[in-house]
Image (cartoon, coloured by chain):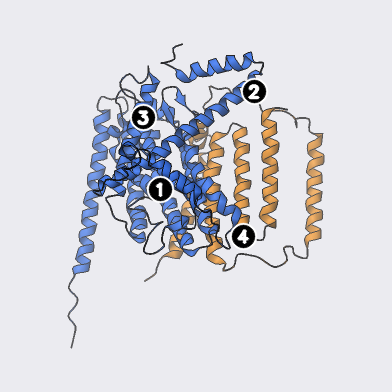
Chain colours: A orange, B blue
């Protein structure tokens, strides 16, 4: 077993365990911290796949910004952050059956695929993946339009929040 | 291969041949050597950190007209060791209602987020941890882990002063991260790379980026001070309002970890200032003798650290609304304007003989325009305050 496979198994176990804790934890702050652990596991997966830029951006964007924002939102909305009610709603057996079926279907399909145990092809050391990513995001025959549309969307959200918060006189 | 020209390589080849001679496999040997390197690096940084306690206390004493520690050892040099013994033998208190796991994890993550930074620092030619091609972003990511540790400490202490201090500090760190990231983009524009190795190498021969972008260096310094939570931006602690902020409940070595993290963080930012804008380890004969480069790097980082201390112990704390206004209405727009000016001037003048003076002049002009705009707007504000009230009708 290659080193990357061992790391994959460990980080996948970390992601799944913390994802379960996110939904089952009764304390909302603990749920947020488990969410950070899950997102950190995803960053490890990116790093194993030689996508250093994505790994670092995952940490900056999700752990740095969204997790902090999430903690702020939790703290500013609830007086007591412990949830004492029932954690499932009456429809849970149906949801369990549906998710088991989805898992079973995906498992059946993927176990027939013969590329499952393959390692990713190594990236030659001379390729500058970061420069390629930057060029792809800004070149007209690649992804410049989706990139710009996403930035316009973010700008709209920014202006919207300023408008909502603005003190009208 | 000479020991003086490449010490790390010589030691690692020697250790590799020794370990493989003992019958270890090549893969295991390289893993072991990496572990040894990591432990050595962290040890060196932490030993330096112990001495920083002395440096900080001595320098603040000078700024305040005192003598500072002068009893233990020559010039009080061994003062950090009694400090450490005191911290270790203090009672370890966990407050009632504290969230134990989170409470104990916070100081570890706080110090860890600073030590993470040293993985990418080019200490000298051929002496560095890892040459990441996203090193600058990695720096920002490590900083966001630091933010996380502060909110964890503030929340888990079950103390409202700690929580308020954490809120203030996180608000400052999140907002000052923006001008800092933009200031980090300026060396990136000048070199075309995010790797600290490339950024240092492009500044060889006295071609410091400070000369190309003095305003960028200033912006980085200001936002670094805010990121560190040092005066004038040390809103996380206010003795009269929230006591000592997010680490109020921590005693003994747990407080020591926060304190060590803060000192090392300041020194590390001094190092980053030197790497990004003052040539890093470059100096006379530094590329042939890397150990000389280590010396130059530590000296430059110490000067940066000294400037940060100088500001900390000279300037009083400012109010939180002033601080956030300073960031959002002054630093952030200035940083974006500087980014645009640098990008345009860089692509226009690249390769011409007028490159360096042109870059310097563009920075100077931008700074001048900024000062004029500030003067205009502050005059307007003063006039608005002083405006005579309309006559009251009787």
Callout 1–callout 2 Cβ contact below 8 Å = no
Residue that label 2 marks: B28
* Secondary structure type for disc 1: helix
Hey, which residue is sitting farthest top in the picture? B1
Check disc 3 and report its element: helix, strand or loop.
Answer: helix
Residue that extends furthest to the bottom in the rendered view of this protein: B394
Q: Is residue B358 left or right of residue B153?
A: left
Q: Residues within 10 Å of mark 3 (few under 14, many from 20)?
A: many
Q: Position of residue B262 (x, y in %)?
A: 42, 46
Whether B209 is drawn above or below B237: the answer is: above
- The disc, 3 or 2, on the residue closer to the chain's N-terminal end is 2
Q: Position of residue B9 (x, y in %)?
A: 49, 18
**Disc 4 secondary structure class:** helix
Dot label at residue A28: 4
Instruction: Please rate how many residues cluster around mark 4, counting C-alpha atoms within 10 Å: few if below 14, some from 14 to 19, many from 20.
Output: many
Q: Chain of mark 1?
A: B
Instruction: Indicate the chain on which mark 2 is placed.
Output: B
Against A114, residue B18 (above or below) is above
Relative height, residue A73 to residue A145 (above, below): below
Q: Earlier in the sequence, mark 1 or mark 3?
A: 1
Q: What percent of the width, then of the height, locates residue B80? A: 40, 42
| Pointer 3 residue | B297
Front disc: 3 or 4: 3
């Amino acid at each position: 077993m290659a080193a990357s496979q061992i790391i994959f198994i460990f980080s996948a176990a970390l992601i799944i365990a913390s994802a379960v804790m996110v939904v089952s934890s009764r304390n909302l702050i603990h749920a947020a911290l488990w969410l950070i652990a899950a997102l950190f596991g995803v960053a490890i997966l990116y790093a194993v796949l030689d996508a250093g830029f994505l790994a670092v951006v995952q940490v900056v964007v999700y752990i740095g910004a969204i997790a902090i924002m999430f903690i702020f939102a939790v703290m500013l909305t609830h007086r007591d952050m412990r949830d004492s009610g029932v954690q499932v709603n009456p429809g849970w057996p149906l949801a369990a059956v549906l998710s088991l079926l989805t898992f079973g279907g995906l498992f059946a399909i993927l176990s027939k695929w013969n590329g499952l145990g393959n390692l990713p092809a190594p990236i030659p050391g001379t390729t500058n993946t970061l420069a390629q990513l930057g060029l792809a995001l800004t070149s007209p025959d690649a992804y410049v339009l989706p990139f710009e549309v996403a930035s316009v969307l973010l700008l709209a959200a920014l202006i919207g929040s300023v408008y909502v918060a603005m003190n009208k006189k | 291969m000479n020991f003086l020209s490449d010490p790390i390589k010589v030691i690692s080849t020697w250790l590799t041949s020794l370990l493989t001679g003992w019958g270890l496999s090549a893969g295991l040997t390289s893993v072991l050597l990496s572990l040894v390197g990591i432990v050595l690096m962290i040890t060196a940084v932490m030993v330096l950190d112990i001495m920083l306690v002395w440096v900080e206390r001595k320098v603040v004493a000078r700024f305040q007209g005192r003598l500072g520690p002068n009893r233990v050892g020559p010039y009080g040099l061994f003062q950090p060791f009694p400090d450490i013994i005191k911290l270790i033998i203090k009672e370890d208190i966990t407050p009632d209602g504290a969230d134990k796991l989170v409470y104990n994890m916070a100081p570890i993550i706080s110090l860890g987020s600073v030590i993470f930074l040293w993985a990418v620092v080019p200490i000298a030619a051929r002496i560095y941890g890892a040459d990441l091609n996203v090193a600058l972003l990695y720096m920002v990511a490590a900083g966001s882990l630091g933010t996380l540790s502060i909110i964890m400490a503030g929340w888990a202490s079950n103390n409202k002063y700690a929580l308020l201090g954490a809120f203030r500090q996180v608000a400052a760190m999140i907002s000052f991260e923006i001008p800092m990231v933009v200031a980090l983009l300026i060396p990136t524009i000048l070199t075309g790379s995010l790797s600290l190795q490339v950024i240092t190498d492009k500044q060889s021969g006295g071609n410091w980026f400070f000369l190309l972008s003095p305003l960028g260096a200033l912006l980085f310094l200001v936002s670094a001070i805010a990121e560190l939570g040092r005066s004038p931006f040390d809103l996380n602690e206010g003795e009269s309002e929230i006591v000592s902020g997010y680490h109020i409940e921590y005693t003994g070595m747990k407080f020591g970890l926060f304190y060590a993290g803060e000192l090392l963080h300041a020194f590390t930012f001094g190092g980053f200032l030197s790497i990004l804008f003052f040539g890093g380890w470059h100096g006379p004969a530094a590329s042939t003798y890397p150990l000389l480069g280590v010396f130059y790097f530590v000296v430059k980082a110490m000067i940066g650290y000294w400037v940060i201390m100088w500001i900390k112990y000279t300037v009083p704390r400012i109010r939180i609304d002033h601080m956030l206004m300073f960031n959002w209405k002054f630093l952030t727009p200035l940083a974006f304007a500087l980014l645009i000016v640098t990008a345009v001037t860089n692509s226009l003048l690249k390769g011409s003989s007028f490159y360096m003076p042109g870059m310097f002049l563009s920075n100077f002009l931008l700074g001048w325009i900024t000062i004029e705009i500030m003067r205009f707007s502050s005059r307007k504000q003063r006039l608005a305050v002083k405006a005579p009230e309309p006559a009251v009708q009787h």
